[in-house]
Image (cartoon, rainbow, N blue to C red):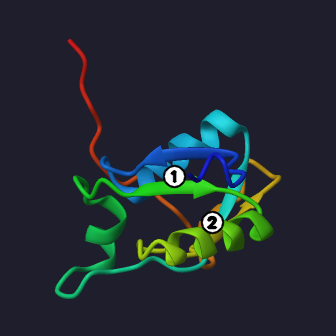
Amino acid sequence: MARRCGAHAMIDISDGLALDLHRLADASGVGFVLDEVPVAAGATLEEALGGGEDYELLISMDEADARRLTEELAGRGRPVPLLIGTVHRDVGVRVLGDQELERLGWQHRLG
């Protein structure tokens, strides 16, 4: 449904939001400004950024398309996406608030 509504890029964040966000930005040649991170009750911000196995999707799309996706999902009684930040043209801008965002998360080792 996200693709049909205009998603530009999408990745599951099962290795951690911070790491998978960097991977999406690397593949797309962009930076990002992360404004808000949802933190589950009882969890820390670091766990929310670097914890995995959440099987959530991180989707990049413009605001009008995000509103359309939200309306379609809400109309079906499905969870709606949260706006957590914006894409930045400068690949060097990769921040949470005013701090550089580390690549926190699960690093797979091959071989």
- Residue 34 in view (yes/no): no
Q: Are marks 1 and 2 in contact (CB under 8 Å)?
A: no
Residue 24: quarter of image:
top right
Viewer-nearest residue: 79 or 43: 79
Using the rendered image of the protein, determine whether residue 17 is visible from the camera's viewpoint.
Answer: yes
Q: Most extreme residue toward the right, as rendered? A: 89
Residue 73 x/y as whole percent? 52, 69
Q: Residue at x 51, y 52 (%)?
A: 21
- Along the line of sight, which residue is nearer the eye, 16 or 5? 5
Label 1 SS: helix
Expressed as whole percent of the image width and height from the top left, the position of residue 17 reads: 41, 58
In this view, the residue farthest toward the left is 42
Q: Quadrant of the C terminus?
A: top left
The image's mark for residue 69 is 2
Q: Which residue is mark 1?
A: 21
- Residue furthest toward the top? 111
Please say if 7 is above or below 94: above
Q: Residues within 10 Å of mark 1 (few under 14, many from 20)?
A: many
